[in-house]
Image: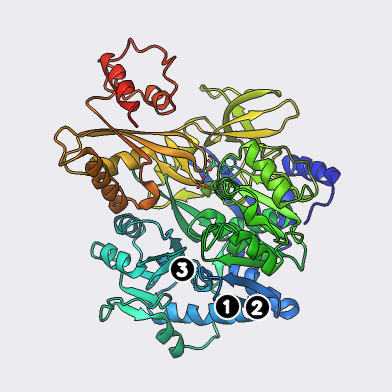
Amino acid sequence: MQITSFKQYEEDYKKSIENPEQFWGEVAQNFQWRKPWFKVLSWNFNEPQIKWFEGAKLNITENCLDRHLEKNGDKPAIIWEPNNPEEESVTLTYKMLHERVCRFANVLKRNGAKKGDRICIYMPMVPELAIAVLACARIGAVHSVIFGGFSAKSIADRINDSQCKLVITADGAYRGNKQIPLKDVIDDALIGCPTVEKCIVLTHVRTPVSMLKGRDVWWEDEVKHVNDVCEAEEMDAEDMLFILYTSGSTGKPKGVVHTCGGYMVYAGYTFSNVFNYQPDEVYFCTADIGWITGHSYIVYGPLSQGATSVLFEGIPTYPSPSRFWDIVEKHKINTLYTAPTAIRSLMSFGEDPLQGKDLSSIRVLGSVGEPINEEAWHWFDEKIGHSKAPIVDTWWQTETGGIMISPIATVTPTKPGYATLPLPGIQPILVDENGNEIAGNSVSGNLCIKFPWPGMLRTTYGDHERCKQTYFSTYENLYFTGDGCLRDEDGYYRITGRVDDVLNVSGHRIGTAEVENAINMHAGVVESAVVGYPHDVKGQGIYAFVIYPEMHGEAELSKKDILQTVTRVIGAIAKPDKILFVTGLPKTRSGKIMRRILRKISDGDTANLGDTSTLLDPGVVEEIIEAAKSL
Ligand code: PRX
């Protein structure tokens, strides 16, 4: 199923459009099914109702583990690189990973988990995180991984939304020179989570933790009580595999639901093709498993293809900004898949961190999560890839399950700043505000997809109507991505960023409404408005305009108080970079905040604010502009 020439790409693409069922039916033959499907696809985007490989039975872990044992049992499946480079890295072969997944799956069963139960995972980037994810899949439980940067309140909201029965966590996590008390955060969260019966705790940093009798058990103790034989649960292709919460334009994150069959086929197919993975290569994706990139391209995609996937606990700048390059040299990395934010941050340290590092193993580079600016693209190309490694700029989303628009390494061309061409099976379309197609080249519009693909979301957990409203109601018969996009004279796609109220901060998706809600929870804050502004490293920074009439102490202290509140409500990742205290916000007569004006002010572009005459109080704009000069 690997595409090896541009001509084949064109042929496959054509076939995938003309006969999608035949195309995906053939791709799916490369996976292991307990029972075949009777229909490849049935769909309608109105309800929406999407079914792939209907009637088929499988277990994704048999595809990620069991089927590799005979030939590749001793091949490394996961290489774990710890936060501290002085510590030994850990290699788990397919055989070892299989054994540990089965054993932990039995631990889950022993603690009352069964098919269909939701299980929350809140863990550091250690091999046990991948093991926990796969163990859930093994027994047919639905995992909901929550990124380690979210607060207790965020965790509780997510646990309650999907009514998780079990939580898997660790005592703590290392991130650079910081230690994060994960179990403490979970303890705070669980105060408000009546559905959680058990919490399994891995010892990792060996910090003291409270263990509640009857609820909390140690991972290390539990695995001693079970064996490592665990038959995989037979799953329907359309059974739920996992829930992953993501931000939208409302204040409440939604649980994106992916199912077993289609997701597996799509993650595996795109991994194999986009990175042009070769059998003995070492592949390193620097994302966290708490995000979709980690689900699809650290765990399921690579393992389904029998690849060697590196899992890194730390951060790019610890103990020095050479860390990524040390890892590349140490593990002879062939593919490095990372985010523009990381590239820009490392770029800012100049070339010293690269001195003496052997990067010759690198064959393919990848970028994900946000638009990559040309400067960063060229630096990545020249300094890291030595102009020999194609960069795959992969555009996709939590909802798409896998990569949608991207070069195919060594096969299709690259172009700085461009995600380039759609993968086979993907039918992008640009539309104007009214949903009319914008045909031809050298055009821009809102990016939609007009035909289903196997990895797409099926629903948002517990609220199908919301799925319909968010993705399928803006434009009839189209999946709306929320992204703006241009198609250049060659027909190449360039994603220009979100067109809704969603920010992309360091590649993390954050809703402005969520941040506003959090700020508004701070005592004394009357109202706030949050916008994104261009940030050299993060891509976008968070700029908050806050009305706080009776400030408690000095302004600087009050800002810190607000940051603390945001950290409590959402997590440190949503802390505003700038807070400006104002006495009013620019609103229309109907009371709508005119964010367009605030965005311009946050960007320092105040010369042409456009028409402000429709504002309730035009004077407030002058006042904000004056105040903004002080930041
Ligand atoms: O705006 C797009 C941006 O990230 C959004 C999806 O975020 P999330 O669901 O968190 O998934 C991130 C990892 C796939 C998109 O709507 N985005 C993602 N990849 C790119 C991108 N923007 C530009 N270029 C990309 N390659």
User: As shown in the figure, which amino acid type bears the numbered disc 2?
Assistant: Thr
Tell me whether circle 1 and circle 3 mark residues in contact (CB < 8 Å). no
Image quadrant assignment for residue 261: bottom right
Helix, strand or loop at mark 1: loop
Image quadrant in which the N terminus is located: bottom right
The answer for how far apart the CA atoms under marks 2 and 1 are is 16 Å
Viewer-nearest of discs 3 and 2: 2
Q: Is residue 569 above or below residue 91?
A: above
Viewer-nearest of discs 2 and 1: 1
- Whether residue 180 is visible, yes or no, is yes
**Image location of residue 414, percent across then percent down:** 74, 41
Mark 1 or mark 3, which has the lower sequence index? Answer: 1
Instruction: Judge by depth and name the residue closer to the eye, 600 or 628.
Output: 628
Q: Is residue 473 above or below residue 406?
A: above
The answer for how far apart the CA atoms under marks 3 and 2 are is 24 Å
Residue highlighted by disc 2: 93
Helix, strand or loop at mark 3: loop
Residue highlighted by disc 1: 88
